[in-house]
Amino acid sequence: MMPVMLHLVTAQIFRPQVITEEFLVSCGALLNHIKSIDSGETNLESAVGQTGSEEFIRIVFSSWEAITQHPMLLTTYHSTIVDCILPPLVSLVLSQNAEWRIFSLRLLSETLSLVANHEAMLGEKGENLMTNSKLLTLFQESLLPQYDQILMEPDPVPLYALKLLVTLTDHSPIFIRLIEDCQVVPILFQVILDQQDSVLGTAKQSVVLLLNNLVAYKGASMKMLYEQGLVDSVRNLFIEMTAIYFEMDEKSGLKSTNNLLLSLIDTLHNMLKHTSNVVRSALQAQKSDAGGDTQAAEELLLINKPLTDLMSLLIQLLSSDDPDVHESSLLSLSLMVQLYGGENQESLSPENMDSFAEALKCRKDPKQQKLLLRIIKRLVSSNKNHAESIKSEGDILIETLQRLAQATSSHADIAIGSLASEILKIIEQ
């Protein structure tokens, strides 16, 4: 009968008819049966032999895998999936059988992803996949405490395990807290170190996405992330990824590289935004005589200072043809110069001056032009060496600034012209 089940769920004509709530409950029962075989509670081999037992398990896994390829058939059965399918899959991730572990991790990740995506699309209220107390308990008490071992296993186990964490943290901050509580974060940084020679490897890509989810979460334990080496990891990953991005041609996986680069820029932006918020709060408290913690702000500025090594790369990304890359880089660069001014001596190198000039010529959006000019103004006003560099080696940038200073055809142009004139005055001084 088991081969018939696989045939029914893989046949286009039969599949919509057999996938019912009762059928999904039966799938859950079969997965629980595999769980009892794995734990030794059931001995199927004595009845059907080793080959028959292995065939039974393979068909059950393959049948559910086939079902997950058709998410629209499952949209009305989310509660059944959460109650009947996910718990045995979570348990089987911890199986002693490596093949079952891999299969279960992959199926768990795919199942969670399709259910979570559909729930997010519908905006469902009340208890859902990511707030189901039974499922949360399973993850917290059974799965996540074992993740240090799972992530250190040979491939492809860590690949699926990381993909699962990305799915979970994409959809719920609850899992970010669970990951922090279960001490999974240190293992993530170990994975980054272990994958140093594989910049575009699947595991490293997942860690980049996961780091972005962690840093973007407002309640994240930034102190723990910094202690684990967040700054060095992000700086090194950014340098590696931009090197690949600049070398890529349009036909060699540029889209996936763009997505990873955007995730890293977003992570960098959130780190800088966190620092900026702490500094702003300390300054406001100091002004109001509330005794702001300026020491904490100063320490955070010092911790994040190595990120200024990325300033030149951000400036070069301003000329990117991808509008998302350009805009994200511009916002991160703006925050960086607000915090650190012109401390990076290479920020107005000849190459970077040309990048600024190119960006000012190509970007016609007045808001972006003004932001670019404010960045340049902050650099030259906070470090007189930068003004000297532009005066001696920045002819193209000076010409661009002069052109903008003379444009007065609209209110936006007047504001832009005023900023350009201010920069030229600082340079001339």
Image (spheres, helix red, strand yellow):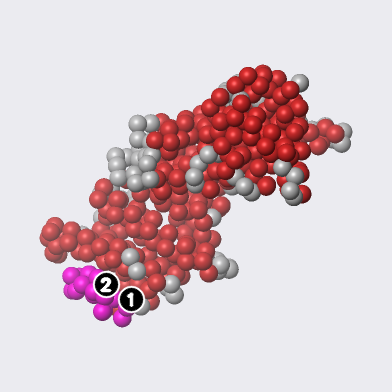
Vertical placement of 218 versus 241: above or below? Answer: below
* Residue situated in front as seen by the camera: 123 or 80: 123
Vertical placement of 245 versus 425: above or below? Answer: below
Q: Secondary structure at mark 2?
A: helix
Residue at point 34% right, 69% down?
A: 70
Residue 245 on image: x %, y %:
43, 38
- Residue at the disc numbered 1: 19
Classify residue 20 as left or right of residue 61: right
Q: Are marks 2 and 1 in contact (CB under 8 Å)?
A: yes
* Residue situated in front as seen by the camera: 125 or 382: 382
Residue 407 on image: x %, y %:
72, 42
Q: Is residue 222 visible?
A: no
| CA–CA distance in space, label 2 to label 1 | 8 Å
Residue 18 on image: x %, y %:
30, 78
Number of the label disc, if any, that sits on residue 9: 2
Magenta region, mostly helix, strand or loop? helix
**Residue 358 sits in quarter:** top right
Query: For the residue marked with disc 2, what is the amino acid?
Result: Val
**Residue 353 sits in quarter:** top right
Classify residue 100 as left or right of residue 240: left
Classify residue 276 as left or right of residue 328: right
* Residue situated in front as seen by the camera: 405 or 330: 405
Residue at point 53% right, 27% down?
A: 351
Residue at point 52% right, 34% down?
A: 316
Q: Residues within 10 Å of mark 2 (few under 14, many from 20)?
A: many
Q: Is residue 121 visible?
A: yes
Query: For the residue marked with disc 1, what is the amino acid?
Result: Ile
Q: Which residues are magenta?
A: 1-17
**Quarter of the picture holding the N terminus:** bottom left
Looking at marks 2 and 1 on the same chain, the residue that comes earlier in the sequence is marked by 2
